[in-house]
Amino acid sequence: MLVSGRRDFLLGVRFAFRSRFRGWYQRPHGRAPSPIFLTLEVTNRCNMACRHCSQHRRPGEETDLPWETVAGVLDDFRDRRPFLQVTGGETLLYPDLSRLLEQAERLGYGMVVQTNGLLLDRWQEALLACRAVKRIAVSLDGDAVAHDALRRRPGSFAEVWRALERLQEEKRRRGRRLPLLQVVTTINAVTVASLPALAEALERLGADFLVLSHLYFGTREQVEKHNARWGGTFPYAPHLEEGELNRVSEEELQASLREVRNRLRTVRYFEPPRRGANVEQRGHRHL
């Protein structure tokens, strides 16, 4: 669990200990430890159609995870209470999100809610009021020019940024540190040059974490093998196959990451590992 500050650290240690040792699953061929994290993809609806995302390319109609299924999962894990990662699609479009927040708080879960931020103003009060929400993870891809180009929605960066400023201001007004603010950005040919500018802006915003991640690519052969076995349940669309967005040189990437590290002071950040690197260097961590 990502923690910051003495109080958050103690909460994190208590949570990790509880999650790791609370119970063991009985498996057909033995026993397995309880999971520490549990991801709930509650919807595939989204209010964007980003160039680097396969969500809107999935065949079939928009669907939501039935509330009965979500409630059943929360009840099944109530004695172990793994940390929940609630995602989509766009999580804030899930029609039963209010019920999920209420149930998670009642059962004593902790969670991170992932969002593209466009509906953050609408949900700000509910997210701040729910004690289960420990972290809000917002996707921002580089600076305004890069973000808007990838999201194919002019002005979306500014719209989300204003919502983040209002969120941080409301937390300060209430004397709250939680939920922590995590910004997630993808590394690709459009964003790589603007990562340092984003890092500097997040310092001014007072964000807690910056997570950098590579895009996921699949060759046509890999996609065909996957869909042959799992296509009926988890179909994978062959987007960005050897496409332009993944053409980032190692030299360009490392130069950008060095500048990111130089500009960050209080924001903790996590980057993809590189060959020969230590697991942790200079206060930053590798995923």
Image (cartoon, grey):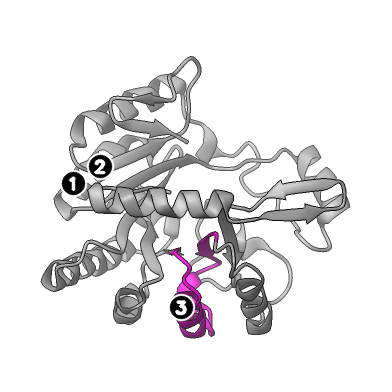
**Could you tell whether 69 is left or right of 174 in the image?**
right
Confirm whether residue 157 shows in the render. Answer: yes
What percent of the width, then of the height, locates residue 214?
50, 39
Dot 1 and dot 3 residues touching (CB under 8 Å): no
- For the residues labelled 1 and 3, the Cα–Cα distance comes to 29 Å
Indicate which disc, 2 or 3, sits on the residue closer to the N terminus.
3
Dot 1 and dot 2 residues touching (CB under 8 Å): yes
Residue 101's tag is 3
Farthest residue in the left direction?
Answer: 173
Which one is nearer the viewer's eye here, 221 or 207? 207
Instruction: Mark 2: give few (<14), some (14-19) or many (20+) Cα within 10 Å.
Output: many
* Residue identifier under label 2: 199
Residue at (48, 49) in percent of width and height? 17
Residue at (50, 18) in percent of width and height? 275
Which one is nearer the viewer's eye here, 48 or 79? 79
Residue at (59, 42) in percent of width and height? 216
Which one is nearer the viewer's eye here, 219 or 179? 179
What percent of the width, then of the height, locates residue 3?
33, 48
Residue 203's tag is 1
- Magenta stretch bounds: 82-111
